[in-house]
Image (cartoon, grey):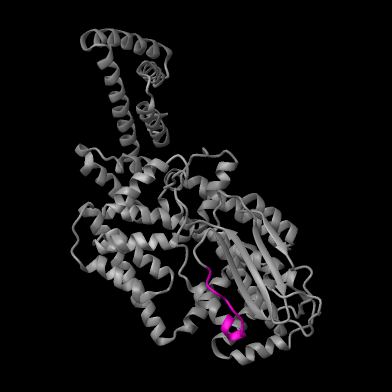
Amino acid sequence: MANKGDTEAQFELGKIYDKAILIQDYEEVVSWYRSLRVNEHEDAYQQSHVGEQLDKREARDSQDLGRKWYQKQVVYECQKTATDWYRQAAEHGYSKALLYLGVQTTTDNDAEALNWLCQLAVNPILEGDEYEGELSETEDDKAIASLREKAEQEISVAQTVLAYLCKTGNGVSQDQQQAFFWFEKAAQLEDIVAQYWLGSLYFEARKFERAKEYFQQVSQNRHHGYYDELDMAKIESLAKDQLLVLQGIELEIKNHKELENVMAMFADKLTGPLQRIEYLEKDERLLEDVRLMGSMLNIFSLVSSNAKKLRDNLLQDRAGEGTLLSVLEQALSISVAAMLTLNNRDKIRQHYLNYAKRTEQVPVTTTRKQWKSNHLELELQLQADWQRSFMDISNAPRLENLSSWLTERFFPIEVQGFAEAPIHFERYGATESTLLVIISEIFTNALKYYASQTQQTVLLRWKCDTHRCKFVCANPTSYKEQSIGKGNGKGHQFLPIIARQLGGEFPLPPFVKNYAVEFKIPTHLLKEEFPKQESKL
């Protein structure tokens, strides 16, 4: 596999050769070296030929150099072969190989080692959602220890790589404080990649002024150092793009464009019902979708203009045939239908890829980059098949059917508290429409940012106390999924608005693997009386 260009095989073969230096018995090294060189060849005739050639060489070199010097020469060749295999893997961007080569400390390869580290540093930015960088938490301890030594020696690119590993929890324990520490040290040394990451981190934390400072440092200052000129130019261009985004955000904040956010969310929430209308044409479900759209339109109008009237409408809508479970079923149906459109397939690409792996339609080693480049037809086929099969069950969405469909293609779900909740309201009224908007937006984000390789359960929980009713959506994710641009961010701008208008709470969740979103609504808006035996949240 290594000879055929498999980067992981190349790297692993390099590690095997690299272990030769740990063996004290030179006779064992010679024997091991012979076995490795023979086994690199798959054809039996080639193996026999290689064995014969090694026998002749060993006899000749032992006589010319002496047995002791020949044995040392074999150790040297093992190390050189290891480096050659690492280099082949690194040239394809394989992160482990880049790290191993980047922390080499011999005096004659310092410049080359820094070049490999530079490539490791820039790849997550330049490759974006196609970046495939995974390190082991145990096998790479020695390499990471060497990286830390270089960082402590004030080598800025080593500090940047170490910071990135701390930020993502890749090869080391995830530690945002340490990530900021090393990024800031590298940024002080004018490391352009560290400055870019600091801008991104402050942007994610919605500290836009700090983000702007760092993106300006990237785009305005002349940089010198270890990085390739073309790579620096690309990162400068990305920083300028981010400054334009920040410019738009500043204008939006200045003009209080909350109404635009509401209308953007309105369009987004209607994608699912509109898709069903297009698909079903004159089907009986058409009337249901039209009523849903009309009721949600009314809610968006109230959210944008009259908070008191919105709350009054909920207070007057606390009885009827509508239930919390029926709202959850509708919200899940709307969210999934919206994500299954052709235009949205890139936002749930991880699910198509993982499904293809589980059903053995592609090798389990297939990366996102390979999937995007080589399996477009299969992705399009899956998108069409999933959309068709989901429309069949969404005509009358029931939780058990939705759960079974999601488990097969996306992830398993666990639902708590919805069926038991003593909350009732009119169909297509203020309460149903408000809850539909909130739950569907939050679940849509779970679909987009779920780490599909984990196949862990997504928890959907409802619970009330005397003061607040709380909806929780806990979905396993990864920094990689969260860092891929899968939307315009209007949802996370709108949900705090509707929470404020309701007198509730929507704290922005941190960017962590165990991602949990909470939305709290005052209990009295949903229930007339509250049983005393229920416990607080």
Q: Is residue 353 above or below residue 327?
A: above
Q: Is residue 80 above or below residue 69?
A: below
The verdict on residue 81 being magenta is no
Q: Where, by quadrant of the figure, is residue 214 drawn? A: bottom left
- Horizontally, residue 13 falls left or right of residue 426, namely left
Quarter occupied by the C terminus: bottom right
Q: Is residue 190 above or below residue 97?
A: below
Q: Which residues are magenta?
A: 499-509
Q: Look at the image and tell me whether residue 444 can be seen.
A: yes
Which residue is located at x 65 percent, y 64 percent? Answer: 332
- Horizontally, residue 41 falls left or right of residue 499, namely left
Quarter occupied by the N terminus: top left
Viewer-nearest residue: 228 or 347: 228
Which residue is located at x 70 percent, y 84 percent? Answer: 525
Q: Where, by quadrant of the figure, is residue 360 drawn? A: top right
Main secondary structure type of the part rendered in magenta = loop
Q: Look at the image and tell me whether residue 276 can be seen.
A: no
Viewer-nearest residue: 474 or 430: 474
